[in-house]
Amino acid sequence: MSSTSSTSSPRPRRGAGLGPGVAGRAFAVVGRAPRSPLPWSQESVDDGLQSVLAGHQRLVAARWEAVFEDLDEDVLGEVAQEARQDGRDPAGAVDVFVRGLVRQLEDWKQADTALAKALDEAALGRPMPVWAADALAAEQGRLWGARQALLEAVARHHHGGPAPW
Protein backbone atom coordinates (compact mmCIF):
# COMPACT_ATOMS: atom_id res chain seq x y z
CA MET A 1 0.00 0.00 0.00
CA SER A 2 1.35 3.26 -0.85
CA SER A 3 1.33 5.80 1.71
CA THR A 4 0.21 9.13 0.60
CA SER A 5 0.23 11.87 3.04
CA SER A 6 -2.08 14.72 2.79
CA THR A 7 -0.47 18.08 2.51
CA SER A 8 -2.50 20.10 4.90
CA SER A 9 -1.06 23.14 6.55
CA PRO A 10 0.07 22.67 10.10
CA ARG A 11 -2.18 24.00 12.82
CA PRO A 12 -0.92 27.17 14.46
CA ARG A 13 0.17 26.77 18.02
CA ARG A 14 -1.89 28.41 20.67
CA GLY A 15 -0.60 31.85 21.66
CA ALA A 16 1.58 32.09 18.59
CA GLY A 17 -0.76 34.66 16.99
CA LEU A 18 1.46 37.43 15.65
CA GLY A 19 4.76 35.79 16.32
CA PRO A 20 7.55 37.20 18.44
CA GLY A 21 8.85 39.69 15.89
CA VAL A 22 5.56 41.43 15.14
CA ALA A 23 4.37 41.41 18.75
CA GLY A 24 7.68 42.75 19.99
CA ARG A 25 7.60 45.62 17.50
CA ALA A 26 3.96 46.43 18.34
CA PHE A 27 4.75 46.56 22.06
CA ALA A 28 7.82 48.69 21.41
CA VAL A 29 5.67 51.26 19.61
CA VAL A 30 2.89 51.24 22.20
CA GLY A 31 5.06 50.88 25.30
CA ARG A 32 7.54 53.66 24.42
CA ALA A 33 7.39 56.84 26.46
CA PRO A 34 5.99 59.79 24.52
CA ARG A 35 8.52 62.28 23.17
CA SER A 36 6.73 65.20 24.81
CA PRO A 37 4.60 65.05 27.95
CA LEU A 38 0.94 64.34 27.49
CA PRO A 39 -1.18 67.49 27.97
CA TRP A 40 -2.80 66.14 31.13
CA SER A 41 0.38 64.76 32.71
CA GLN A 42 1.81 66.35 35.85
CA GLU A 43 4.97 67.24 33.91
CA SER A 44 2.93 69.13 31.33
CA VAL A 45 0.92 70.88 34.06
CA ASP A 46 4.16 71.89 35.82
CA ASP A 47 5.54 73.24 32.53
CA GLY A 48 2.36 75.27 32.04
CA LEU A 49 2.54 76.65 35.58
CA GLN A 50 6.20 77.60 35.14
CA SER A 51 5.41 79.30 31.84
CA VAL A 52 2.63 81.36 33.44
CA LEU A 53 4.91 82.38 36.33
CA ALA A 54 7.79 83.28 34.01
CA GLY A 55 5.54 85.47 31.86
CA HIS A 56 4.19 87.28 34.89
CA GLN A 57 7.65 87.75 36.36
CA ARG A 58 8.93 89.33 33.13
CA LEU A 59 5.99 91.73 33.17
CA VAL A 60 6.36 92.63 36.86
CA ALA A 61 10.14 93.01 36.77
CA ALA A 62 10.03 95.21 33.71
CA ARG A 63 7.08 97.34 34.67
CA TRP A 64 6.69 97.72 38.42
CA GLU A 65 9.51 96.40 40.54
CA ALA A 66 11.99 98.92 39.13
CA VAL A 67 9.59 101.78 39.93
CA PHE A 68 9.16 100.81 43.57
CA GLU A 69 12.63 99.35 44.17
CA ASP A 70 14.34 102.53 45.42
CA LEU A 71 11.24 104.45 46.45
CA ASP A 72 11.68 106.51 49.60
CA GLU A 73 11.10 110.05 50.85
CA ASP A 74 14.14 111.26 48.89
CA VAL A 75 12.44 110.40 45.59
CA LEU A 76 9.41 112.46 46.59
CA GLY A 77 11.72 115.27 47.70
CA GLU A 78 13.40 115.24 44.29
CA VAL A 79 10.00 115.49 42.57
CA ALA A 80 9.15 118.50 44.75
CA GLN A 81 12.56 120.10 44.10
CA GLU A 82 12.23 119.71 40.33
CA ALA A 83 8.77 121.28 40.48
CA ARG A 84 10.14 124.26 42.45
CA GLN A 85 12.92 124.73 39.89
CA ASP A 86 10.37 124.68 37.08
CA GLY A 87 8.14 127.19 38.89
CA ARG A 88 5.40 124.64 39.56
CA ASP A 89 3.63 123.78 42.79
CA PRO A 90 5.83 121.20 44.61
CA ALA A 91 2.94 119.74 46.62
CA GLY A 92 0.87 119.33 43.45
CA ALA A 93 3.78 117.65 41.67
CA VAL A 94 4.26 115.18 44.52
CA ASP A 95 0.51 114.54 44.59
CA VAL A 96 0.43 113.78 40.86
CA PHE A 97 3.50 111.52 41.22
CA VAL A 98 2.03 109.60 44.17
CA ARG A 99 -1.34 109.20 42.42
CA GLY A 100 0.50 107.70 39.45
CA LEU A 101 2.23 105.24 41.75
CA VAL A 102 -1.10 104.31 43.37
CA ARG A 103 -2.52 103.57 39.89
CA GLN A 104 0.51 101.39 39.16
CA LEU A 105 -0.06 99.50 42.42
CA GLU A 106 -3.67 98.90 41.37
CA ASP A 107 -2.50 97.61 37.97
CA TRP A 108 0.00 95.35 39.74
CA LYS A 109 -2.76 94.04 42.02
CA GLN A 110 -4.93 93.27 38.99
CA ALA A 111 -1.98 91.49 37.36
CA ASP A 112 -1.55 89.38 40.51
CA THR A 113 -5.26 88.52 40.44
CA ALA A 114 -4.90 87.53 36.78
CA LEU A 115 -1.82 85.46 37.71
CA ALA A 116 -3.79 83.54 40.35
CA LYS A 117 -6.53 82.83 37.80
CA ALA A 118 -4.03 81.79 35.10
CA LEU A 119 -2.24 79.46 37.53
CA ASP A 120 -5.55 77.92 38.52
CA GLU A 121 -6.42 77.33 34.85
CA ALA A 122 -2.94 75.94 34.10
CA ALA A 123 -3.31 73.45 36.97
CA LEU A 124 -6.16 71.80 35.02
CA GLY A 125 -8.35 71.35 38.09
CA ARG A 126 -5.60 69.78 40.16
CA PRO A 127 -4.46 71.13 43.50
CA MET A 128 -1.79 73.81 43.12
CA PRO A 129 1.70 72.37 43.71
CA VAL A 130 3.45 73.82 46.75
CA TRP A 131 6.17 75.49 44.65
CA ALA A 132 3.56 77.31 42.52
CA ALA A 133 1.59 78.43 45.58
CA ASP A 134 4.83 79.68 47.14
CA ALA A 135 5.68 81.60 43.95
CA LEU A 136 2.22 83.21 43.94
CA ALA A 137 2.63 84.17 47.60
CA ALA A 138 6.04 85.68 46.82
CA GLU A 139 4.52 87.77 44.03
CA GLN A 140 1.82 89.00 46.38
CA GLY A 141 4.52 89.75 48.96
CA ARG A 142 6.39 91.93 46.46
CA LEU A 143 3.19 93.88 45.81
CA TRP A 144 2.63 94.32 49.55
CA GLY A 145 6.25 95.46 49.96
CA ALA A 146 5.85 98.05 47.19
CA ARG A 147 2.67 99.35 48.81
CA GLN A 148 4.41 99.63 52.17
CA ALA A 149 7.37 101.44 50.57
CA LEU A 150 4.99 104.00 49.06
CA LEU A 151 3.15 104.52 52.34
CA GLU A 152 6.40 104.95 54.24
CA ALA A 153 7.85 107.33 51.64
CA VAL A 154 4.73 109.53 51.79
CA ALA A 155 4.71 109.54 55.60
CA ARG A 156 8.38 110.41 55.84
CA HIS A 157 8.14 113.04 53.10
CA HIS A 158 5.25 114.83 54.79
CA HIS A 159 6.23 114.31 58.40
CA GLY A 160 10.00 113.83 58.20
CA GLY A 161 12.19 111.64 60.36
CA PRO A 162 11.69 108.02 61.23
CA ALA A 163 8.27 106.44 61.00
CA PRO A 164 6.15 107.11 64.09
CA TRP A 165 5.55 103.43 64.71
Image (cartoon, rainbow, N blue to C red):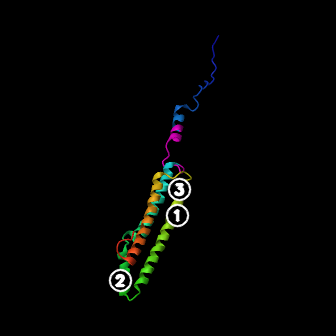
Q: Quadrant of the C terminus?
A: bottom left
- What amino acid is labelled 3 in the image? Ala
- What amino acid is labelled 1 in the image? Ala
Question: At 38% from the left edge and 77% from the top edge, which residue is drawn?
Answer: 159
Secondary structure mostly taken by the magenta-highlighted segment of the chain: loop
The numbered mark at residue 87 is none
Q: Quadrant of the N terminus?
A: top right
Disc with the residue nearer the chain's start (1 vs 2): 2
In the displayed structure, 81 sits above or below 144; it is below
The magenta span reads 26-40
Question: At 53% from the left edge and 51% from the top edge, which residue is drawn?
Answer: 127
Secondary structure under badge 2? helix
Distance from Cα at disc 3 to Cα at disc 1 = 12 Å
Q: Which residue is mark 2?
A: 81
Q: Which residue is mark 1?
A: 114
* Along the line of sight, the residue nearer the viewer: 76 or 138: 76
